[in-house]
Image: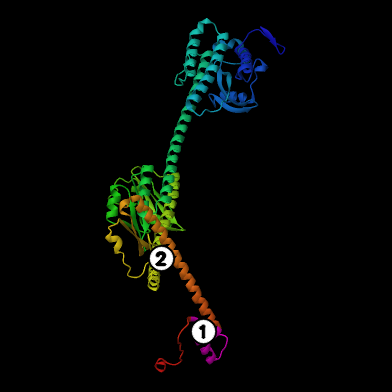
């Protein structure tokens, strides 16, 4: 039949044919398969190190098959090997080697390049099926060269099954109809298909679990973002508290969410907001919990989250008649500026609802809420302080304007005769008697009226329009600002003059330590500074100076 490596072969046995086809396939398709044994007739068919190890495990009965993933110069490859047992038909060539029927003669190994896993499970299935189909086609070709037409039916069945597997029917079974090499090959492919089926099923399950985890995590992050937006935009503490518990309950699909804050006595955690009818009922009865007791009280006292995976088994559960369906619960402390100000309680009607990742997200949201509530309190306090300052300044400003108006008559009148100052008890009856369209707008400083603008239109121009009134109001507002600025400037100048005078008089008086000289200097400076007709300084007790 031929000569190879100096050895003449008279029969073309399966190993020789398989090696020739493997070399041809390996050169063109990068796939290879190999029939070998621990005692090969042809040294060229000697097993590799891994194949030798696998064959020994077959002979000892340690393994029924074996596989390995190796890294070669061409990349990673998947190698699978199944044993070949001695049959009656094998004794013709292998009896002289001491084999008996049923012994492990060797094994067939298949080497398939590993492809990168596809993002979609269908693509992985198709690629693996095509690889199996290719290997099956090659093996069918080898078997076709070794057998005659009497076993063409089993080969046809094997080809049909392989085609179905290549099309994606991994549940298709390959049943061996004989116990010869063809049957062994069918069994080997059946095992390989089963392993592929298990691997793909495991991959699909992992992808499903990962997808669910990512979806849940995405929902939690969206909830955290929503809480952050509410915390940064809502300054009303009451609205913020109710919005927060509503967002958390809806986004996490929970049974109940409540928010507690520590009262002024630092002994009780008082419910400030709750979801659903249960929340309304507990708010109506002013529900509160003692700090240090129960889930919420423990969380506040220890500044740490507490989780009850099964509420019925936890001795510190939040037992309330309004929440009979609670199965699992977590209490999350609200922290702000290094201290605990309250806690969130999150409850579900399913057990084991709060894993470590969920608690981490809830704690992040709770910290945001704690800071927002603290900021809201600071905002309220600052607004109160600002309002107090405004009232105080308004009172001062009102008194200053009253004093200014008493000192001088302020006001001017503009008409066809020109601009004239308004004198006390001025008569404005002429415009009213003419029945001209009138508009009066008050002048206000910090909400206090200091005067007014009175304007009349000619009768031919008609009544005041909304646009004209709006313009007059805008001008009055600007006039208010300008008048207050002018008053402040005048007040500042007057104070500066007073301080200058006081400083000058004091400086002259401190030029000497003689009592008479000091008194004389003081009386002279006072008379000259204020242009007085007469001034007198007299020392003595009240009775003596009268």
**Going 50% across and 20% down the picture, which residue do you hit?**
129
**Going 43% across and 61% down the picture, which residue do you hit?**
481
- Looking at the rendered image, the quarter that the N terminus falls into is top right
Q: Residues within 10 Å of mark 1 (few under 14, many from 20)?
A: some
Which residue bears the numbered disc 2?
Answer: 389
Find residue 400 and report its image quarter: bottom left
Residue 373 location in percent, x, y? 40, 55
Q: Report the side of 543 relative to 188 (left or right).
A: left
Which residue bears the numbered disc 1?
Answer: 525
Count of numbered marks: 2
Residue 316 visible? The answer is no
- Under tag 2, what secondary structure? helix
Residue 247 location in percent, x, y? 37, 45
Please state which of residues 315 and 234 is positioned toward the viewer in this rendering.
234
Please state which of residues 483 and 343 is positioned toward the viewer in this rendering.
483
In this view, 393 is above or below 1? below
Please state which of residues 193 and 289 is positioned toward the viewer in this rendering.
289
Residue 121 location in percent, x, y? 48, 27
Q: What stretch is highlighted in magenta?
A: 508-529
């Amino acid at each position: 039949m031929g000569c190879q490596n100096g050895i003449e072969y008279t029969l073309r046995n399966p190993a020789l044919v398989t090696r020739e086809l493997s070399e041809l396939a390996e050169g063109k398709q990068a796939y290879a398969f190999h029939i070998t044994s621990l005692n090969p007739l042809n040294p060229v068919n000697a097993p590799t190190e891994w194949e030798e190890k696998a064959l020994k495990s077959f002979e000892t009965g340690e393994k029924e098959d074996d596989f390995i993933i190796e890294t070669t110069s061409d990349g990673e490859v998947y190698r699978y090997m199944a044993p070949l047992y001695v049959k009656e038909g094998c004794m013709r060539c292998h009896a002289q080697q001491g084999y008996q029927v049923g012994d492990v003669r060797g094994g067939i190994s298949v080497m398939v390049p590993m492809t990168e896993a596809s993002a979609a499970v269908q693509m992985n299935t198709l690629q693996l099926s095509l690889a199996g189909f290719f290997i099956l086609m090659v093996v069918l070709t080898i078997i076709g060269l070794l057998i005659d037409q009497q076993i063409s039916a089993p080969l046809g069945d094997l080809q049909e099954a392989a085609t179905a597997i290549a099309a994606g029917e991994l549940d298709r079974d390959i049943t061996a109809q004989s116990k010869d090499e063809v049957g062994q090959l069918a069994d080997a492919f059946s095992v390989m298909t089963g392993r592929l089926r298990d691997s793909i099923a495991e991959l699909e399950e992992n992808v499903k679990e990962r997808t669910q985890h990512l979806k849940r995590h995405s929902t939690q992050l969206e909830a955290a973002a929503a809480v952050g937006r509410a915390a940064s935009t809502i300054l009303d503490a009451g609205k913020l508290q109710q919005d927060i518990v509503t967002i958390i309950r809806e986004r996490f699909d929970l049974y109940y969410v409540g928010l507690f804050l520590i009262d002024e006595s630092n002994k009780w955690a008082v419910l400030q907001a709750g979801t659903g009818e249960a929340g309304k009922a507990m708010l109506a009865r002013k529900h509160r919990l003692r700090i240090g007791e129960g889930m919420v009280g423990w969380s506040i006292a220890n500044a740490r989250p507490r989780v009850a995976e099964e509420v019925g088994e936890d001795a510190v559960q939040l037992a309330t008649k309004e929440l009979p369906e609670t199965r699992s619960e977590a209490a999350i402390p609200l922290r702000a500026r290094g201290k605990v100000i309250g806690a969130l309680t999150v409850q579900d009607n399913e057990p084991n609802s709060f894993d470590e990742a969920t608690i981490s997200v809830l704690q992040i949201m709770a910290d945001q809420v704690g800071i927002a509530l603290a900021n809201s309190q600071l905002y309220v306090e600052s607004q109160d302080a600002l309002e107090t300052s405004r009232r105080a300044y308004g009172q001062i400003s009102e008194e200053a304007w009253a004093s200014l108006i008493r000192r001088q008559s302020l006001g001017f009148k503009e008409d066809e005769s020109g601009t004239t100052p308004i004198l006390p008890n001025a008569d404005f009856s002429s415009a009213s008697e003419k029945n001209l369209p009138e508009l009066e707008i008050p002048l206000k400083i910090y909400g206090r009226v200091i005067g007014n603008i009175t304007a009349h239109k000619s009768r031919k121009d008609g009544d005041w329009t909304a646009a004209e009134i709006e313009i007059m109001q805008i001008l009055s507002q600007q006039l208010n600002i300008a008048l207050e600025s002018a008053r402040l400037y005048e007040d500042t100048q007057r104070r500066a003059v007073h301080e200058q005078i006081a400083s000058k008089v004091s400086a002259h008086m401190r030029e000497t330590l003689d009592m008479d000289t000091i008194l004389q200097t003081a009386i002279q400076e006072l008379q000259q500074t204020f242009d007085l007709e007469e001034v007198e300084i007299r020392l003595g007790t009240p009775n003596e100076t009268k």
